[in-house]
Amino acid sequence: MSRDQELKQRWALLVEKLSAQFADGDPLDLDAIIYLIGVQELGQLHRQFKKDQKLDLMHIAICKVLVPYGYYELDFVDDEGWPHYKALEELPHLKAGEQSLLMKEAIVNYFLEAEFIS
C-alpha cells in the first residue's frame, strides 16, 4: 500500500473515532481535531475557553504535532499550565493542499504514538 493511501485510511479512521467520541458522529474537520489536540495537551479538559484562548490551543497543537519534524520544541510551561514552544526552523512555504497534508500526517503520527489508532 502506498504511503498516501495508508495516510488516507488512517486519517479516515481517526476522523471516525474522534467524531464518534466528541461530535455525536458528525465528522470533525482538521481545525476541530487540532483544537482537540490543544485541549489534550493543555490538560484542562472540562474548561470553557475564550476565542483567543481557542486560537492559543490550536497553536499549541500545531507546535506539538510538528515537534517530531524539528520545527518546534517545548520551551516552558507557564504558571497556568500553558505550554510554550519555540521555533527551531522556519516552516517551509507550502501550498494549501501541501499544508493540509503535512498537518494530517503529523496528526496521524501524534495519535499513532498515543496508541489511539494503529
Image (cartoon, grey):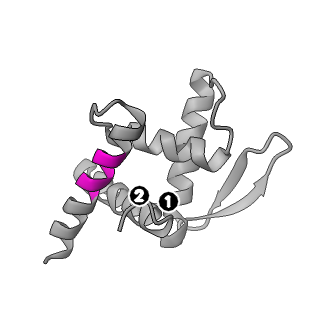
Q: Which percent across, then down, holds residue 76?
A: 78, 57
Q: Which percent across, then down, holds residue 116?
A: 44, 60
Amino acid residing under circle 2 = Ile
> Which mark is first along the chain, 2 or 1?
1
**Secondary structure found at label 2:** helix
Which secondary structure type mostly characterizes the magenta part of the structure? helix
Query: 20 and 66: which one is in front?
Result: 20
Q: CA distance from mark 1 to mark 2?
A: 6 Å
Which residue appears at 52% of the width and 41% of the height? Answer: 58
Query: 22 and 49: which one is in front?
Result: 22
Q: In the drawing, does residue 54 fall left or right of residue 29? A: right
Rendered position, 115 above or below 53:
below
Amino acid residing under circle 1 = Val
**Outermost residue to the bottom:** 1
Q: Which percent across, then down, holds residue 115?
A: 46, 66
Q: In the rendered image, which quarter contains the C terminus? A: bottom left
Rendered position, 7 above or below 2:
above
Q: Which residue is mark 1?
A: 65
Q: Which residue is mark 2?
A: 107
Q: In the drawing, does residue 52 fall left or right of residue 29? A: right
Rendered position, 24 above or below 44:
above
**Are the two marked residues, 1 and 2, in contact with CB atoms closer than 8 angstroms?**
yes
* Local crowd size for mark 2, using a 10 Å CA cut-off: few (<14), some (14–19), many (≥20): many
- Is residue 92 something one can see in this rendering? no
**Outermost residue to the right:** 79
The residue range painted magenta reads 11-17
Which residue appears at 58% of the width and 41% of the height? Answer: 39
Which residue appears at 60% of the width and 37% of the height? Answer: 56
